[in-house]
Image (cartoon, rainbow, N blue to C red):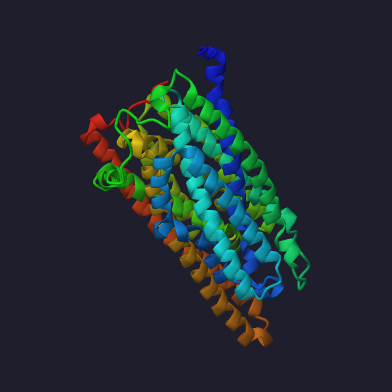
Amino acid sequence: MRKPDHKSTKLAPWLALACLVVPMFASYFFDDMFSTLSHLFENPSLLELGWNSADYGLYTSGYSVLCVFGGLVICGMLLDKWGVRITGSIFVAMMAGGAAMVAWAITSGLPPKTSLSVAYVGCMLFGLGSEIAGVAVTRSIAKWFKDGPMAFAMGLQLAIARLGTAFALVMSPRLVAAKAPGEIYSLAETARPAFLGLGLMVAGMILWAIFVAMDAGFDRTSCHPERNEESSTKEGPFRFSDVLGLLKNKQFIMIALLCVFFYSSIISFKKFASAILIPRFGVPVEAASWMVSMLPFSTVIFAPLFGIMVDKIGKGTRWMVAGAILALIAHLLLAFAPAGVPFYGYLSMVFLGFGYSLVPAAMWPSVPKLVPAKVLGTAYALTYWVQNLGLMLFKMFAGKILAARSGIAGQAGNDMGAAGNGALDAAAGQASGAVGVEIMFVTVCVLALLLAIGLRRSSARKPELRLDAPSSM
């Protein structure tokens, strides 16, 4: 067999990474397409779609349902059994199919509860497809960058994927432009972000197919026989009984729990960003969208830089603690900073953006240090499973808190409308709901910080785990 060209061999991982990031970019866009439009659901009479905040919270929670009830763990084991090419292709297609179902439900003209049910099912399929596709991407990066800058590659993938979130946060308010008071948002207008997301997914599916061809060629090369998906690793073939070993690994369990609480404090927050930022800091929709877009934009710069830092100097558990502290400070500001002062909203997003870059840059590359390669897909799937359990619950809780406060305010406004106090009561109710949701996120951040501190102490007691060691370059 002809020996591969050295330059092309060095370039191949980066070409593979370029193919892998586009499906994730599309996934992040579609998942966050309504985040800066969430305030619209507080007044369903202005939406032809007819959903309220509780309906929207239920819809977003659908992302995690199949993941939580066994699908993610089972499919993660299949990923280790069948490899990323077969399993990943199935679930990239499922991701796109679920998104198409959501877009159809929004434009179908069905009664609100019926369209919500259809969109909920679509979101469930989209969510499971996205999560398994994400596991396949992460596992592929661990494979292609096994002896190289893995943390940097993972950070770069996260950064570009989160550009999808930034794109959604900025573009959605422009695609669904603000209307004059009393005007109705049509179904077609509401669905514009969904159809843009579908277009991005088509591009992602094409590039995924290119990656599959590259990965098959990668496994055929004689210089990487130990990485061949079709052969056993030096640790032996995957067995379903290996999952029990993961459940006995205390450090892995702590990382999984850190993942659920830390990500819930950010991803669940983003889903209701405009419903929190607008009443808390008195900003218009456009300013709120730019404010929350600081989160993904900051990771575009800092996630790869922090990845390089983890690769070169290590200290991963310290960065996890630092990121958890920054997230806690951010939510304390969102909950208790003086109302009506936009500066505090921007400052909180700065802290949250740094935390959103630090923790993942150190957390995800730590997993391959703790588990055998043959169960790496299952390990990531278990982590995503716990994460999705938290996301499902906290999104539902946030939607119910906002809907309950808005409902109370709306009733007060109806009762006192003659006195001209209805609008004031509604605004007060929205602000009260925002504070209530933020108190929930503060609690979540405290739990994340305690887990990060636990990992730091565990690393100090067991240096052989190499959680704080630099990655090989």
Q: Is residue 50 above or below residue 334?
A: below
Q: Is residue 446 above or below residue 238?
A: below
The residue that appears at 62% across and 46% down in the rendered structure is 26
The residue that appears at 57% across and 41% down in the rendered structure is 161
Point out the residue furthest to the front here: 1
Percent x, y for residue 308?
A: 46, 27
Q: Nearer the viewer, residue 225 or 165?
A: 225
Q: Nearer the viewer, residue 48 or 429?
A: 48
Percent x, y for residue 401?
A: 49, 70
Q: Is residue 100 above or below residue 364?
A: below
The residue that appears at 65% across and 57% down in the rendered structure is 100
| Quadrant housing the C terminus | top left
Percent x, y for residue 378?
A: 37, 44
Q: Is residue 19 visible?
A: yes
Is 21 left or right of 241, judged from the image as shown?
right
Q: Nearer the viewer, residue 156 or 71?
A: 71
The residue that appears at 45% across and 18% down in the rendered structure is 222
Q: Is residue 221 above or below residue 342?
A: above
Percent x, y for residue 14?
A: 56, 26
Number of marks in picture: 0
Point out the residue furthest to the left here: 461
Is 182 left or right of 230, judged from the image as shown?
right
Q: Is residue 261 visible?
A: no
Is 230 left or right of 252, judged from the image as shown?
right
